[in-house]
Image (cartoon, rainbow, N blue to C red):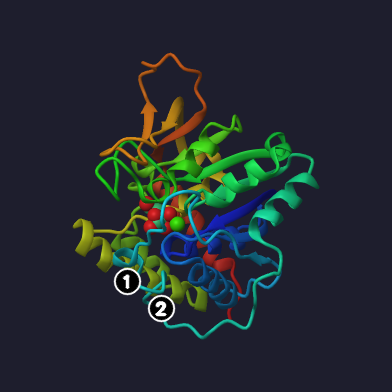
Amino acid sequence: KRKIILDCDPGHDDAIAILLAAGNPNIELVGITTVAGNAEVEKTTNNALKVCEIAGITDVPVFKGSGQPLIRNRETAPDIHGDSGMDGPVLPEPEKTFEDEHAVDFIIRKLMDSDGEISLVPVGPLTNIAMAMRREPAILPKIQEIVIMGGGTFGNWSPAAEFNIFVDAEAAKVVFDSGVPITMMGLDLTHQALATKEVCARIASIDNRPAAFVSDLLEFFRQTYLDVFGFEHPPVHDVCSVAYCIDPSVVKTKHVRVDVETKGELTYGMTSVDLLGVTGLEPNVNFATELDHTKFWDMVIEALNNLPEQ
Ligand code: BDR
Ligand code: CA
């Protein structure tokens, strides 16, 4: 089993990423850590707890993390995810609570106790990961791999920058410069992970509560992606990182140099992806370029089928 810590800001696609991780037998979800991103950290934490509850995920602890980026002021995405960060599905308040330990402390403790078999899967701003690296640099050689959803060769928050990187580019810089093996699911890849009508019909035909929840999530997400970006189908970005952990052959990657821009007036939060090797710098990232759409959605649907009926 592959051990992962999922660091997230649910978030419609974050929620589906949690369900895929929990529903796949080859993943051991060591913990869920939360961060401010799509909404304030109190909301993203509450959303993570709700997802666990609706999917019967009782054995995975949830840790609340950073509420503010390292340097910048917080920015959230209510136009895309609604005010709660996960608008659409109507869910009861969770009974499950988050742990007392801070997410950053949990990440450090788990990694220090490990023999290098844990991967980090950050699918929100990189604040928690950067904080952990700065607080305890001895974790660096312990991290098996970091599978980031973020960045790309174009932006969705500014023309140059993707949301997760833009929200805390200083944190992203710490992580991309860390020397830890990184695989990156940027927008180039995640915009191939579209919840088409056909995919939604397959999900709708699954007769359990987690699948009904995903249908509600996708209905809301479809509308905001249409309104804001004019997309016909919404891309479920964060799910790509978990799918890669389950089966790396679901994407094709290119080993390239990626650096994070933290100074530019128009380019703040941009990931500079050296696809042609023009910098001559040592590659530091497996950059995902192509998704096997069929394999990807088969994986998600299988996981939803595996989740318990609530
Ligand atoms: C990323 O931003 C968030 O809105 C999504 O959850 C995803 O992590 C896509 O840019
Ligand atoms: Ca996210």
The local secondary structure at tag 2 comes to loop
Query: Which residue corresponds to the image point at 54% horizontal and 72% vertical from the top-left?
Result: 51
Where is residue 60 drawn, in percent x and y? 68, 66
Which disc number belongs to residue 89?
A: 2
The answer to whether residue 238 is above or below residue 274 is below
Is the residue under label 1 in contact with that under label 2 (CB below 8 Å)?
yes
Q: Nearer the viewer, residue 283 or 195?
A: 283
Q: Which residue is mark 1?
A: 220
Q: Quadrant of ligand 2?
A: bottom left
Give the left or right position of residue 12, taking residue 144 as reference.
left
Viewer-side residue, 161 vs 201: 161
> Could you tell me which residue is drawn at 48 percent across and 61 percent down?
36
Front-lying residue, 155 or 199: 155
Count of marks, rendered view: 2
Residue at the extreme bottom: 92
- Under mark 1, the amino acid is Phe
Question: Splitting the image into 4 quarters, where does residue 74 fall?
Answer: bottom left
Return the mark for residue 273.
none
Residue drawn 81% across and 47% down?
A: 113
Please indicate whether residue 98 sits to the left or right of residue 43 in the image. Answer: right
**For the residue labelled by badge 1, is the local secondary structure a helix, a strand or a loop?**
helix
Q: Is residue 208 visible?
A: no
For label 2, being within 8 Å of ligand 1 is answered no
Residue 107, position as x, y percentages in the image: 68, 52
Query: Residue visible at 64% across and 71% down?
Result: 57
Q: CA distance from mark 2 to mark 1?
A: 8 Å
Picture coordinates of residue 292, whole percent (x, y): 42, 43
Up-down: is 243 above or below 217? Answer: above
Q: Where is residue 280, by image quadrant? A: top left
Mark 2 and mark 1 lie on one chain; the one further toward the N terminus is 2
Q: Quadrant for the C terminus, please.
A: bottom right
Q: Position of residue 165 (x, y in %)?
A: 41, 45
